[in-house]
Every structure is written in C-alpha cells, then in structure tokens.
Amino acid sequence: MTIRSGYTVCPYDCPSTCGFYAEIEDGRLKAVRPDPDHPVSPGGPCRKMVHYERSVNAPDRILYPMKRTGAKGTGAFEMISWEEAVREITSRWKDIIRESGSEAIAWCNYSGVMTPVQRQCGWAFFNRLGSRGLVRTLCANAKGAGYQSVMGSIGCLDPREVKDSDFLIVWSSNVPATRNPMMRELREFRKQGKRIVTVEVCGIDMARYSDELLLVRPGTDGALALSMMHVLEREDLADREYLRTWAHGYEVFRESLSAYTPEWAEEICGVPAASIEALALEYGRAKAPAILLGSGFSRYANGGMTARIITVLSQYTGAWKQPGGGLCGCNPTGGSYLNGALTDPPEFHGKHPSININQLGQGICDPSVRSFYVYGSNPANSVSDTCAVLRGLSREDLFTVVHERVMTDTARYADIILPATYSVEQTDVYTAYGYCTLSAAPKLIDPPGECRTDWQTFQALAEAMGFEDLFFRQTEEELFEKLLSGMKGNAAALPEEARESLRKGGAVTVPYADHLRFMKEGKQWNIVNESMEEPVPRWMPPAGGPEPLRLISVPGLWSLNSVFHERTEDLIPARGPMILCLHPDDAAERGIATGDDIEAFNDLACVRFTAFVTDLTAKGAAAAPGVYAHSLTKSGLGVNALQHARLTDLAEATTMNDNTVEVRKYS
Ligand SMILES: Nc1nc2c(c(=O)[nH]1)N[C@H]1C(S)=C(S)[C@@H](COP(=O)(O)OP(=O)(O)OC[C@H]3O[C@@H](n4cnc5c(=O)[nH]c(N)nc54)[C@H](O)[C@@H]3O)O[C@H]1N2
Ligand SMILES: Nc1nc2c(c(=O)[nH]1)N[C@H]1C(S)=C(S)[C@@H](COP(=O)(O)OP(=O)(O)OC[C@H]3O[C@@H](n4cnc5c(=O)[nH]c(N)nc54)[C@H](O)[C@@H]3O)O[C@H]1N2
Ligand code: SF4
Ligand SMILES: [Mo]
C-alpha cells in the first residue's frame, strides 16, 4: 500500500476557493485534510467537500464514453470507445457545418469547474469552430455590472478586512451556505460585541448568526437603500464633503432622495419605517460600517439598478476611507490576476449570433440549431424555464453531446456522453472571486476508467476537426506554467517564492486592492453615470407576474447549484425533501402547515414541494432552497420550471428570483 499526500483546491463556483490536502492511497483519493496555513480556510473545507473522496469515488461515476440506445431522456446507453465517440461527433459536425454552417452548433458551459484551463478550453474551441455564441450570465452579472458602473475597476473589501469594521450588514447573502469560511469572522465579530444585521427574504440559515433580521419583499432592496440615504441626509450623517469631492453627480442624486422617505419605502419593501430609520441611524453612526453584499437581490429585472444603489449607500457615510469599512462581496481583486488570452485566445473570437444561457430552452428549440454540446453545466436543473430546456433536449434531430462525471438530468438526454474528471485528476490554476488569493494544484491521481479532462477532450475534438492551431497542441501542464509565469494585476508583483509554491500546489494571498485608488488617480466614481440608460439611480420595481406570491431560489446548505447529487449516502439524505418556505400568514390563508404536500404553479409549470412554514421568510414570498435532481422531486421538476427567461436591466443576466406563483395543498 502506498500512501501519499498532495495539495488540492476546491474547483467549484464558490467565492472562497478553499485549499486542502488530499490523502492518496494506492492511487485513489482516500480522505481530505485541512491546510492549517491556508489564508482563507485553515479549518478545512465545508460540509460538502469534507468528504470529497465520496464524490471522486462515487459508485455511479461515468467511466466510459457511451452512446444512446433508447429514446431521449430514458437514460439507455451502451459503452463505446473514445475513438468511436470522437469520430461520430466530428463527422456529424462536419456534415452539419457543410449543410447548415458552423452556427448550427450550439453549446453550454457555466460553472461546473471554475478554473481557466479546464473551463475556457471549450470557449476557445467553439470560438475557433465559429459556432453559435453563448452569453454566460447565469449568476451575479447584474450585480457586477451595477457595481462597476459606480466604482469602475476599483476593488472592494476582501472578507478578511471586515474584522476592522464596527457594524456589518449582511445583505442578501446566505453566508453559512455560500461563504462558509467567513462564518469564523462573523462569530469573532459578534464576540467582540459588534452587531450584524441581515437583510433577507429568507433567513432560515442566517437568522441565528445575526443580531437582527430584516425581511424585505423580494426585489425591493433598492427602495430600502434609497430611504436609508434619505435618513442619512436628513440626520446629517452623509459625508457631504467626501461625496462632493469624489462622487460624480452627488447634488443631483441628493435632491432626488427627498421623495424616498422610510414611510414610502415601507409600502414597497414591507419593512416598518421605524426599522428602516433605526438601521439607517445605526449604519450612519458607525465609524466603519461594512456591507457584505451577496447576489440574490440582483437576480431581478431591477437587479443592476439595485446593485448601483447599494454600492452608493456603501460610500454615503465615507466608510470606504476607514479600515474595514465599505463594501465586501463585489470585486475584491479589482480585476483578473491571469492573462485570459492564454486560455481563450482573442484571435479565435468572431461575430456570431448567440444564445443567452438564461434563454437556453428557446435557443435549443430553434430548429436552426442542429447540435448541442454541454460541459461543466447541468442546464436541465440549473437554468430557468426547465420545460423549455427539456423540450429542446428532447428533439430527436438535435445531436447532443454531454461531457459529465455523473448521470445528470442533462446527460440523460445526450446522444453521446463523454466521461469527465474530478479536480484531483487535472492540473489547473484557481482564482477566487471572493478573496484576494491565488491557488494552484497539479494533477494528483490518474482518473478511473477512461475519464478525460475537458482540455484533453477538446484537444481530441480539435485534432479530429483538423484544427492546426498550436493552441490545441499544448499540454495542460504547459498552459499551467504559462499562466503562472504571466500573472497580471496585483499578482504580477508576487515574489518568485510565491510562484514556486504555487507550481508545487498551494495558495497565496495577493495584496488587497487599494480601495481609495480613485483619490490617487484624481478620478471621481459615479453616482450619476451618463453612459447609462438611467443615468441617475432611482427606484425601479422588479418585474414579477400576476400571482400573489413572489418566488425566490435560495442556495442550499447541502448542495452547490446541482453539484453533489452523487452523494446519495450523506448529503442528499441530510438535505431532505424539496421544501418551499412560506410565511405563517400566507400559509394560514391557504390552510397549509409544515410537512404538507403542496404545489406551486404559474403559467409555466406546476411543481410539488413539501411546505415549510416559518416566520423567517418574508410575508408574500415563497422561498425554495437548493437545486434538486428531477428524480428527487415529487413531480419530476425543480423550482426552475417556475422561472421565466426574462433578463436583468444590466448585463442580460438571470432574473431567477423575479417570478410569482400561487400555492395550494396538493390533492
Ligand atoms: N452551499 C452552497 N454554496 C454555494 C452555492 C450553493 O448553491 N450552495 N452557490 C454558489 C454560487 S454559484 C454562487 S453565485 C455563490 C453566491 O453566494 P452570495 O453571492 O453570497 O449570494 P447568495 O448566498 O447566493 O445570495 C442568495 C441570498 O439572497 C437572498 N435573496 C433572494 N432575493 C432577495 C432579495 O430580493 N433581497 C434580499 N435582501 N435577499 C434576497 C436569498 O434568500 C439567499 O439567502 O454561492 C456559491 N456557493
Ligand atoms: N434553483 C436554483 N437555480 C440556480 C441556482 C440556485 O441557487 N437555485 N444557482 C444559479 C447559479 S448562481 C449558478 S452559477 C448556476 C450554475 O449552473 P451550472 O453551471 O449549470 O452548474 P451546476 O448545475 O452545478 O452543474 C455543473 C455540472 O458540471 C459538472 N462538472 C463539474 N466539474 C466538471 C469538469 O471538470 N468537467 C466537466 N465536463 N463537467 C464538470 C458537474 O458534475 C455538474 O453536473 O445555477 C443557477 N441556477
Ligand atoms: S466553502 Fe466553497 S470553496 Fe470552500 S470547500 Fe466548500 S464549496 Fe469549496
Ligand atoms: Mo453562481
């Protein structure tokens, strides 16, 4: 028996990018062990990753290429060789390109794996192919665009800076689920007698870690933040000198605030005027207040505007000038550390019609799309308007290829399934989107069966398509080295010894962003931004729908989007059935109690849930935690079947929280 240990990093779409050690026994991942020196996760990975070996060694892993033998969606497949698979895929593609052009080939990739080599290789491949484009805005793009329209490329707080703050608002972030390593800081913060107020629609996880929970109606945070600034002005708590000097458009915006009284906001967001007043005063009187801004609030038709307003609020008392004060959760690094041209070469980019990932169902139902390739994404579970996605995937004439690690609701519809690797079986660099850290981890073990990395797969497809570009001839290891030796931004200044430790596998802290760089550059940031359709931030309502209850999706504690469905022995049972959280008043009106079998419906679908009645959910809201495989639901559909494919005001992003439903007992 040979036992060894190697460094590895969590590959998932999670702001923390924790690092840990992998114990390897006879070439298999045996266990994971914390890295006590890790800059973010010294306590080790979260509840989902602490038994990563159970995922990597899952008995139902896909190990060989497979070809469909039954009707689409039935999951009937037979094993084939990689040679057959690659030949079949590329000969079909060559025919399609000859008959209908390369834009008849569509693809989907999102955040199954977040690392540049394994994620962006497909972007490079499909750009080179000249396929239909993909607009990748399934997450927090409206928040990013809103923040950027105010602050440009100035970086916000790294979560480790928040300890110096004296008052924290956790705004729309389910921290125990989505920012697990930050729980340590939140506990320490309160131990020091500093208060945490959470602004949420559904506080079932966050309430116990907060001193106070304010429940808002979905999509109305902009009204709350505007009225807080109204109070700050009225009480002389705005830092007027700072705003006059550094904020473009301050006077115009200030005038507009007079209409936004707490009473006005109460009507819209359902938070009592007195509570708004108290929150504004506490925030305004703190020396270095911080806002930890999650993403849920931004997944609405008004999401970009709300992000602008909250960013302005974070500046309104001059908090950014104080250590620990300001805004956390937007863009801590102030830009990329890596040279994206190395993994997604601009010379392959062309102009092609695109599918917005949020409207994927409509995109793949279009008969002019004849083939569809999916990797690092599970759109049958994670994209809005599930029924449209399933209609597209069911098309007999859509030649579909899915590169996956386990049988998913998307893979079930493939003509060809290719077996994918787990992160310990591949080499890559890892940038965190929530921290100023950079990590790297070389491959530790050989994959089982015939699993291949995304990079190796696209290399094989590129060769069979006859691409002669040197780009596709590189190895993962060569790209890894190029990325590490060509770092940008604050990472460019990392000492050689930090690069060396990354080459071997490790994590380093990159110097934090200079939050006051605009002062050094003598440039104002923008309250008013004339380049936008709405130059002056103002209240704009969400879109919603005719039904009485506003439906939101909450990231679950026991899963990460649709990842971890393979964990049938621990995470899946711990999570339990698919629940819908309802306020006691809304439940009573409908004769519903906790545990009842209920159905939520609108013009798109009817989905069954188990009721969970709780006053930790805002009145008028219905909140669905987690993403469920269809086989784990009572009606064969998850919450995304109830979501329209509308886009946000900025960045064409998801509005998955901006929908309405009616709910009744199932009979
Ligand atoms: N365990 C776990 N971890 C995850 C994920 C997961 O699914 N599970 N997802 C990963 C991904 S892809 C991402 S993008 C990050 C996201 O992590 P963060 O950026 O921190 O944001 P979320 O926790 O997704 O924010 C969602 C919260 O917003 C709340 N919310 C919804 N609508 C509103 C609203 O109108 N107003 C307010 N105030 N609150 C609202 C929801 O109730 C929910 O608690 O987390 C990642 N980490
Ligand atoms: N109801 C609801 N819907 C949501 C969310 C929610 O919280 N609730 N969250 C939304 C958000 S914020 C996001 S970012 C999206 C995410 O949406 P997606 O990007 O579709 O993410 P997942 O659903 O997790 O599917 C990722 C898939 O990638 C596979 N995978 C992982 N690593 C690799 C790899 O190295 N190679 C290959 N080929 N495959 C790999 C996994 O096995 C998994 O099946 O979902 C969105 N949809
Ligand atoms: S908290 Fe996020 S980054 Fe850390 S181990 Fe868990 S899923 Fe991975
Ligand atoms: Mo996300």
Image (spheres, rainbow, N blue to C red):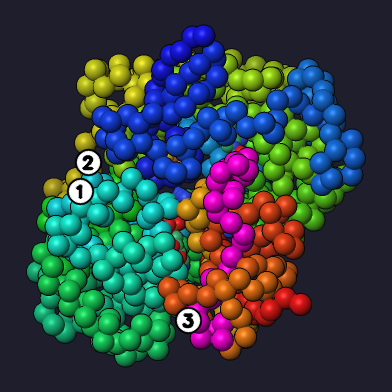
| Span of residues in magenta | 561-588
Residue marked by disc 2: 512
Residue 105, above or below 488: below
Q: Real-space Cα distance between discs 1 and 2?
A: 9 Å
> Is label 2 in a helix, a strand or a loop?
loop
Q: Marks 2 and 1: in contact by CB < 8 Å?
A: yes
Q: Real-space Cα distance between discs 2 and 3?
A: 40 Å
Q: Earlier in the sequence, mark 3 or mark 1?
A: 1
| Res 266 visible | yes
Residue 580 forms part of the magenta stretch: yes
Under mark 1, the amino acid is: Glu
Residue marked by disc 1: 161
Q: Which mark is residue 39?
A: none
Q: Residue drawn 41% across and 42% down?
A: 46
Residue 27, above or below 558: above
**Nearest the camera: 88 or 637?**
637
The residue at label 2 has a CB less than 8 Å from ligand 1: no
Which quarter of the figure is the C terminus placed in?
Answer: bottom right
| Res 303 visible | no
